[in-house]
Structure formats: structure tokens, C-alpha cells
Amino acid sequence: MAKPNQSMLDLILMGYGTLEASMHVMAANNQSISAIPDAGSSWIMPSVPDSALDTDAAAYLKQHKIEIGTLSS
């Protein structure tokens, strides 16, 4: 779920650990990579090829409760 100040790339990086998954996510949601998610909105986070995942990075962010929010207001 999108939080304030989060871009789509923030959500993708937190979910997949890499931006390699961005085109898969945007295609699944029929959106542009420059789409700005509304706070509280949910997005389809599809399965992606292993080459588009960094499970260690995603686990690190989750374990340390790091929530990326690079969208400036």
C-alpha cells in the first residue's frame, strides 16, 4: 500500500529489492513508470523473473522497517 511521499519506484524497490522489476509492475497496472500513487492506494505486484529480484535487499528493508519515500511535495 502506498504511503505519503512514495513514488512507484519506491514501492517497487521495497517490494522487489531492485528496480529491474519496474516494467513488470507498470505493465501489470497499465500505468507509466512516472505515475504517482495516491497514499493508501494498492497496486498489483506481479511475480517477476528471478533476475529482477534482490530478495536480500528487500528483506533488509523489511527487517529494518525502512520505508523509502523519495517523492517531494
Image (cartoon, rainbow, N blue to C red):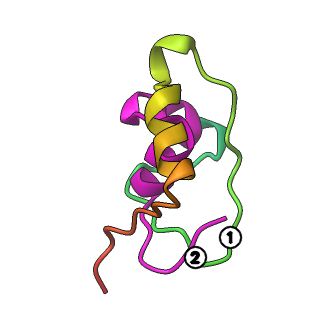
Is residue 21 placed above or below 9 in the rendered structure?
Answer: above
Which residue is at the front of the view, 16 or 39?
16
Q: Position of residue 45 (x, y in %)?
A: 67, 41
Q: Is residue 48 left or right of residue 9?
A: right
Which residue is at the front of the view, 14 or 62?
62
Instruction: Mark 1: give few (<14), some (14-19) or many (20+) Cα within 10 Å.
Output: few
Q: Are the two marked residues, 1 and 2, in contact with CB atoms closer than 8 angstroms?
A: yes
Q: CA distance from mark 1 to mark 2?
A: 5 Å
Which residue is at the front of the view, 37 or 55?
55
Mark number displayed over residue 41: 1
Q: Position of residue 42 (x, y in %)?
A: 71, 62
Is residue 21 on the magenta stretch? yes
Is residue 6 placed above or below 54 in the rendered structure?
Answer: below
Q: Looking at the image, which residue is at 37% across and 57% down?
A: 34
Q: Is residue 15 left or right of residue 61?
A: right
Q: Is residue 5 left or right of residue 1?
A: left
Q: Position of residue 39 (x, y in %)?
A: 59, 78
Residue kind at label 1, given as amino acid type: Ser
Which residue is at the front of the view, 29 or 66?
66
| Element on which disc 1 rests | loop
Furthest toward the bottom, the residue is 73
| Element on which disc 2 rests | loop
Q: Looking at the image, which residue is at 56% across and 74% down?
A: 3
Residue kind at label 2, given as amino acid type: Asp
Instruction: Mark 2: give few (<14), some (14-19) or many (20+) Cα within 10 Å.
Output: some
In the picture of the structure, the residue carrying the numbered disc 2 is 38
Is residue 56 on the magenta stretch? no
Residue range in magenta is 1-26
* Quarter of the image with the N terminus in it: bottom right
